[in-house]
Image (tube, coloured by chain):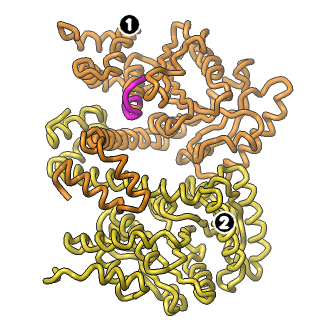
Chain colours: A orange, B yellow
Amino acid sequence: KTAEPPNLTAIAEKVKQGSMRELAKAITFIESNAGDHYLYGQKLLQELLPSTGKAIRIGITGVPGAGKSTFIESFGTMLCDAGHRVAVLAIDPSSSISGGSILGDKTRMEKLAKHSNAFIRPSPSGGTLGGVHRKTRETMLLCEAAGFDVILIETVGVGQSEFIVRSMVDFFMLLALTGAGDELQGMKKGIMELADAIVVNKADGVNKQLAEKTKNEFNQILHFLQPATKGWISKAYTCSALKNEGMDSIWSVIGEFRETVEKSGVLNERRRRQTKEWLHTLIMEQLKNNFYRHPYVKDQISQLEQAAMDGDITPSQATESLFREVYGDK
Amino acid sequence: KTAEPPNLTAIAEKVKQGSMRELAKAITFIESNAGDHYLYGQKLLQELLPSTGKAIRIGITGVPGAGKSTFIESFGTMLCDAGHRVAVLAIDPSSSISGGSILGDKTRMEKLAKHSNAFIRPSPSGGTLGGVHRKTRETMLLCEAAGFDVILIETVGVGQSEFIVRSMVDFFMLLALTGAGDELQGMKKGIMELADAIVVNKADGVNKQLAEKTKNEFNQILHFLQPATKGWISKAYTCSALKNEGMDSIWSVIGEFRETVEKSGVLNERRRRQTKEWLHTLIMEQLKNNFYRHPYVKDQISQLEQAAMDGDITPSQATESLFREVYGDK
């Protein structure tokens, strides 16, 4: 699309120096599905790879209404004021269908968006969920190369998004509301066991006591669950993002977590495992895409699904007939 | 391997009439990885497909020591004595590595094994985990065609085995020991949310009171979790498989479950979804096998994993280089 290929080494250099303009350009390449731009993105990333990995990567999820935006606004602003450089990313699987992102609205974090130490990027949109996954993961690395030392990745909690975010962060936080009973009923299966911390938000005013009670209930449940991170005991906390209360304690908890897992080697181990799993996820994604996009498969799959569900054909036979046609093998 | 192809229609007819000899023969074909025999198995299954689906499919898991064999022996014998025909199958992922199965020992269920209404088949062994999965699933269907009205599928709880069993049964039961606290610490993440019932075994003698306490603790936790089956409230129960106590109540619970999900349509919906998902699982398995068995991939993958983990190359680039070589595409 550009007549002349960009000077990637120069861009990489400027990203490393912290240029927001060049970072945005690099991310645009990474987010592109077009051949040339995609390749520029990959080359840039390759060049910047040695400068990545120094940030703490924090994932944040929670049911709708838990106050994720308010939390990130309050938490992020506190960190930026303290001199940290904070990048806020998002995974929104619905954006892979709608092509638009409900997290694209920077007005949700108005104060943070204006802070010179902050960088907010909405969920990449369009393409497959695997594409959204890849783009967020690689954008995170670009942000690290640009000197951001805190990465916050928000998820809307749709589909597999929490599992995707968990697979790319160091610390995973579940934002909850008061009233654990009802709250938990609405939570996705297995989510609590991914959390390194559960933070009960809106612990202010008349809600404060109830928030304490909810925190205790969560702690009871956490006691029964397997730890999300080896050597770390996940606990529940309270905060009020609206009143900026409890933000510093949460940051302390994260600091303690980081110290623990860095010392034990669990952090390094987790990141290496994440990278390896990510490689295999990419491979599977690509295999899947190539197969399901094949004209014969596209044409036949619904019929075969139906025949299998109706008991007219075994899934093994359906599979074989597809592979015979597509690859000529059994 | 046989000089003359077997008369599959005759075998299918005899299986439908309940011949154990022909059922065993059919399962041997299904379990075979050799071309001819595998094809015979598939043809048989296809012919028998209309006669499948009438059994209640029950999955049973639990930590080592929970008494799964004793439970199945006691529960299965009760059902056989009452005129039911009970098939006991197993999923043991370790058998895909070792080639042998720790569930192969019929002496674990000596009484049941001798019962004329019972059929016990150890976990298929050898091949991939996907292969073990397919063989057990298809064997279940053959057993249904042979007139078994209760299918019990045991899992040793290694690897992904519970999830595999959950994906092929109607009712999933978690066998537990007294002392929920410690018990839960050893449980796999997310297992409790798969269970339609938790049964605390060994509720006898001095253990009886503790078992009641554990049951209550499980009920408290279950209250907070999402139901495993729509419209069904998973609860905890106690039993003593050793003393044959509580077996009838568990069978009543399963009967109630069946009535509920048949009436609501949830059973039919679940089975159709399971079949559809199974088709796509088979496709992914085959794609994966074909790819990872490719000589170039086999040769390069460890090196690429290492380079990605060391941060020398991005997983996207590693993936591309493999696909370029194997398929000649991007």
Q: Residue at x 45, y 73 (%)?
A: B90
- Mark 1 lies on a secondary structure that is helix
Q: Where does the image place residue B15, in percent across and percent down from the top left?
A: 38, 82
Q: Which chain does the residue under circle 1 lie in? A: A
Q: Residue at x 47, y 84 (%)?
A: B119
> From the viewer's perspective, is A215 left or right of A256?
right
Q: Nearer the viewer, residue A55 or B64?
A: B64
| Magenta range | A125-132
Res B201 seen here: yes
Q: Quadrant location of residue B130?
A: bottom left
Q: Where does the image place residue A87, in percent across and percent down from the top left?
A: 49, 19
> From the viewer's perspective, is B89 left or right of B263?
left
- Mark 2 lies on a secondary structure that is helix
> From the viewer's perspective, is B27 left or right of A220?
left
Name the residue beneath numbered marker 1.
A21
Name the residue beneath numbered marker 2.
B259
